[in-house]
């Protein structure tokens, strides 16, 4: 059985005070814009990215790596429906009609 091929990954979490979904950037900070996320293209880079992203325990919670797909223009998009859903924000926004 062949080992699973590595898929590009990014680090994501939630802003501790605002609750917003955020993405770790190549500059070493956090952004609410997925287009600014740093992308790890191999296992070693992913481990290093996660270690750097976890260095903000008083600002960002629930940090983890998630698979992304890369389009022909080099832009990343979530590979899993859960992550795609998270990019749209909390489901308690009025426009989502989840709460009265």
Image (cartoon, grey):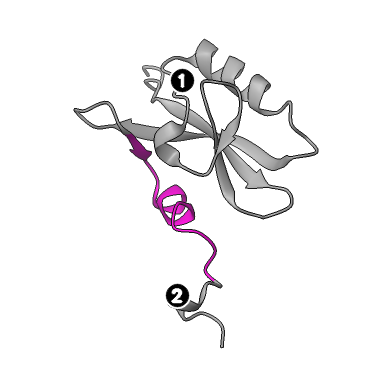
In 3D space, how far apart are the residues under numbered discs 1 and 2 (Cα atoms)?
A: 32 Å
Relative to 95, is 22 on the left or the right? right
Residue lying furthest left in this view?
A: 72
Q: Which mark is residue 96?
A: 2
- Mark 1 / mark 2, whichever is N-terminal: 1
Residue lying furthest right in this view?
A: 58
Mark 2 residue element: helix
Question: Residue shown at 41%/17% (left/top)?
Answer: 41
Q: Quadrant of the N terminus?
A: top left
Question: Residue shown at 40%/51% (left/top)?
Answer: 84
Mark 1 residue element: loop
Contact flag, marks 1 and 2 (Cβ < 8 Å): no
Q: Nearer the viewer, residue 11 or 5?
A: 11
Provide residue 45's location: percent of width, then percent of height.
51, 13
Q: Quadrant of the C terminus?
A: bottom right
Provide residue 97's location: percent of width, then percent of height.
47, 81
Q: Which residue is mark 1?
A: 40
Provide residue 98's location: percent of width, then percent of height.
51, 79
Question: Residue shown at 50%/59% (left/top)?
Answer: 89
Query: Callout 2: 10 Å neighbours few (<14), some, many (20+)?
Result: few
Specify whether residue 89 is painted magenta: yes
Task: Tell us which disc is closer to us: 1 or 2.
Answer: 2
Relative to 77, is 20 on the left or the right? right
The stretch of residues the image draws in magenta is: 76-91
């Amino acid at each position: 059985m062949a080992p699973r091929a590595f898929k590009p990954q990014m680090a994501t979490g939630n802003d501790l005070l605002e609750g917003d979904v955020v993405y770790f950037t190549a500059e070493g900070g956090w952004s609410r814009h997925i287009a600014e996320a740093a992308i790890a293209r191999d296992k070693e880079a992913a481990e290093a990215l996660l270690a750097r992203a976890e260095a903000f325990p008083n600002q960002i919670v629930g940090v983890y790596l998630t698979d992304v797909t890369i389009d022909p223009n080099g832009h990343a998009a979530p590979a899993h429906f859960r992550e795609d859903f998270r990019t749209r924000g909390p489901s308690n926004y009025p426009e989502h009609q989840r709460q009265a």
